[in-house]
Image (tube, grey):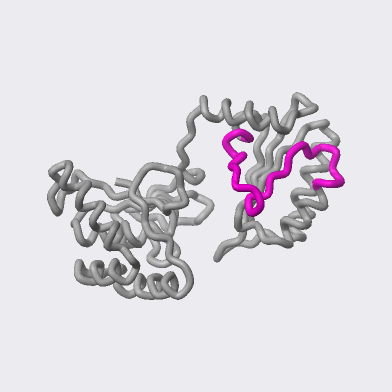
């Protein structure tokens, strides 16, 4: 069983998207109740975090499959920090195995039976942690080709050599600055111009406004840039298409 935020299009059970004071209370309480907590602690936290509907959906899912409490045949999986808290709480209630993809910011990986964490997050070397080269994603070759053809139709290339740049954003550990953009993206743009390669560039929704402004300025003065999609301004997702048609893909973030 998989948990997701309700802004996602993937299959699974949706969890509430908390904001403001409700989000702050849920995070503070999670650290106290879900790390080494009990079933009662988990129920109290779910009540605080508007989790009643999630409990009902999971209970229905179990009932339809004749799954009983404590079944080790069930693995609850979540990706990201917010769904991880509901995953862990329901794991206490149903006594099932829990797995997190990525490192949840509030509770970490320790309370989970399994954690799937990319190497760039410097995960601890523990028996319950599986280290991957990158962040696990669902990749279907046919879809990459279809999305690539669609994107190229909208932004036609000039060169047979196509490079894509995927720029990360800010979080609790990393920050993409305007100066970093000038130094690193500017350098790739100059090389692309020398190599007569076309550049397709996109950002993260968390890329700061200052970094985005600098990127726009650089792109406007580069003959190599064919496409610049700012994630915070455009709801489309060009990444599958860029992966599908590129000769080289640069994935850039601060480490």
Q: Which residues are magenta?
A: 219-242
Tell me what residue is drawn at x 57 percent, y 36 percent: 240
Q: Is 238 contained in the magenta span?
A: yes
Front residue (pair 164, 123): 164
Q: Mark yes or no: residue 78 visible.
A: yes
Q: Quadrant of residue 182?
A: bottom right
Q: Is residue 160 magenta?
A: no
As displayed, is residue 144 above or below residue 189? above
Q: Is residue 127 left or right of residue 202?
A: left
**Visible residue check, residue 255:** no
Place of residue 26 in the rendered image (x, y in percent of width and height, measured from the top left) = 38, 71
What's the residue at 29%, 66% (across, down)? 46
Where is the C terminus found, in terms of image quarters?
A: bottom right
Residue drawn at the location 42% of the way across and 52% of the way down: 6
Determine whether 108 is above or below 192 in the image: below
Left/right of residue 147 with respect to residue 248 in the rendered view:
left
Q: On the picture, is 37 further left or further right than 218? A: left
Place of residue 165 in the rendered image (x, y in percent of width and height, measured from the top left): 68, 42
**Which residue is located at x 60 percent, y 54 percent?**
205
**Residue 239 position within the rendered picture, expressed as x and y whole percent measured from the top left:** 60, 39
Using the rendered view, name the quadrant where residue 92 is placed. Answer: bottom left
Q: Position of residue 118 (x, y in %)?
A: 48, 49
Q: Which corner quadrant of the image does residue 56 belong to?
A: bottom left
């Amino acid at each position: 069983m998989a948990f997701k935020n309700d802004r996602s299009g993937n299959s699974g059970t949706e969890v509430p998207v908390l904001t403001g004071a409700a989000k702050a209370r849920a995070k503070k309480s999670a650290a106290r109740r879900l790390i080494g907590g009990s079933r009662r602690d988990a129920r109290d936290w779910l009540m605080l975090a508007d989790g009643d509907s999630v409990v009902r959906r999971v209970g229905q899912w179990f009932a339809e499959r004749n799954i009983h409490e404590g079944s080790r045949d069930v693995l609850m999986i979540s990706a990201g920090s917010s769904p991880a808290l509901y995953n862990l709480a329901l794991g206490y209630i149903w006594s099932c195995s829990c797995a997190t993809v990525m490192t949840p910011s509030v509770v970490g990986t320790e309370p989970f039976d399994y954690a799937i964490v990319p190497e760039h997050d410097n995960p601890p070397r523990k028996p319950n942690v599986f280290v991957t080269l990158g962040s696990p994603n669902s990749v279907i070759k046919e879809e990459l080709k279809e999305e690539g053809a669609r994107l190229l139709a909208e932004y036609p290339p000039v060169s047979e050599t196509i490079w894509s740049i995927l720029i990360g954003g800010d979080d609790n550990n990393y920050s993409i600055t305007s100066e970093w953009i000038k130094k690193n993206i500017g350098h790739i743009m100059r090389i692309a111009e020398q190599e007569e390669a076309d550049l397709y560039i996109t950002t993260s929704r968390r890329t700061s406004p200052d970094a985005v402004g600098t990127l726009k300025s650089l792109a406007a003065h580069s003959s190599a840039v064919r496409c610049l999609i700012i994630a915070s301004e455009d709801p489309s997702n060009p990444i599958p298409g860029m992966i599908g048609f590129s000769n080289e893909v640069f994935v850039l973030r601060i480490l």
